[in-house]
Amino acid sequence: MGSRTGSAKPRGYAVGFVGGGNMANALIGGLIGAGLYKAKEIIASDVDARKRSQLKRKLAVAVTGDNAALVRDSAVIVLAVKPQIMDTVLADLRAAATPAKVFISIAAGVSTAQIEKGLGGGVRVVRVMPNTPALLGRAMSVVVRGSVAKAADEKLALRLLRAVGRARAVSDETLIDAVTGLSGSGPAYVYRFAEALIEGGVAAGLDRDLASELALQTVSGAAAMLLEAGETPADLRAAVTSPGGTTQAGLEEMARRGLMNTVVRGVERATERSREPGGNTSSASRGG
């Protein structure tokens, strides 16, 4: 990258990632795997030299420890840092931020207004709430654009996020808290339900290994049915529930013990927590 005189020659990158954690790795891998960008078009930064080395070795992208240089050299910048250090990172990037660049943030709980202010105002910001299945290319992400971002910026963010799963846009940023309560935290609810299925199998007399295999494959198969059968959850449930049968007996016991209300209230409480100061630190978008 140096010239004959030894002066640095800036190189342009299509996308730069500030933060080299798990979510950044998933997104970079998805972008390359989907053919949206080549590895040589992507650069990533991280304060941890070990993470930079891993990124370069695993994904063959350029790496740097200089966040401001990354912003100067990139057209699109993905902010994949922990929410608690976002203000510090933004201050570091401010001098290099311009209205010509698009900033896409996957940091939970950090508003577009906060990012715009931290970058000095007048910058194009799109906020994203992804979830951890992005690590397997099965994410559900929701995007919302800030006050300066254009429709084309939202479209770009959707295109990037769809490299690791599904993505939708909303126009009201306050809805991101509910998205966090449902899909951001949602994988943990499914994991808890799987745990309960396993414990139920053990309580009914199965050994733990068999109960685990049965529970996990059942959850996986049911999720595939929900996505691919073209029917509502209620329709699919009715189809496997014979009057007076075992499934009905199990569902009635769960209803008696308040399963539906418990899950609904859980989503509501996670949403409330997301709205509380310092409450939105879902692992779905920590980036570290």
Image (cartoon, helix red, strand yellow):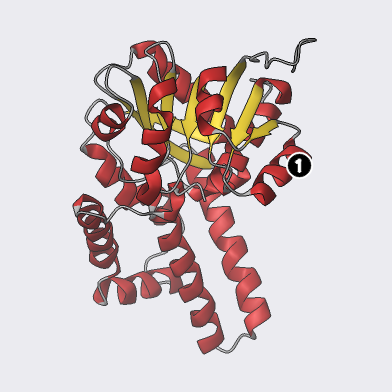
Q: Is residue 224 above or below residue 36?
A: below
Residue 174, image x, y percentages: 20, 37
Say left or right for 85 vs 60: left
Residue 2 x %, y %:
75, 17
Residue 17, located in which quarter of the rendered image?
top right
Quadrant location of the N terminus? Answer: top right
User: How far from the left and from the top, in percent, is residue 34?
Assistant: 66, 26
Observer-nearest of 190 and 91: 91
Which residue is nearer to you in this view: 232 or 46? 46
Q: Is residue 112 visible?
A: yes
Amino acid at dot 1? Lys
Q: Say left or right for 263 vs 66.
A: left
Residue 241 seen in the current view: no
Q: Which residue is mark 1?
A: 58
Please give the name of the residue rendered at 42% of the width and 25% of the height, measured from the top-left corner.
Answer: 103
Along the line of sight, which residue is nearer the eye, 188 or 10?
10
- Residue at x 44%, y 55% (from the top left corner): 283
Give the residue at x 36% y 54%. 281
Task: Tell me the SS state at disc 1.
Answer: helix
Which residue lies at the image location 25% right of the left edge and 25% below the top edge? 171
Most foreground residue, 50 or 242: 50
Q: Position of residue 246 (x, y in %)?
A: 45, 74
Above/below status of 173 relative to 51? above
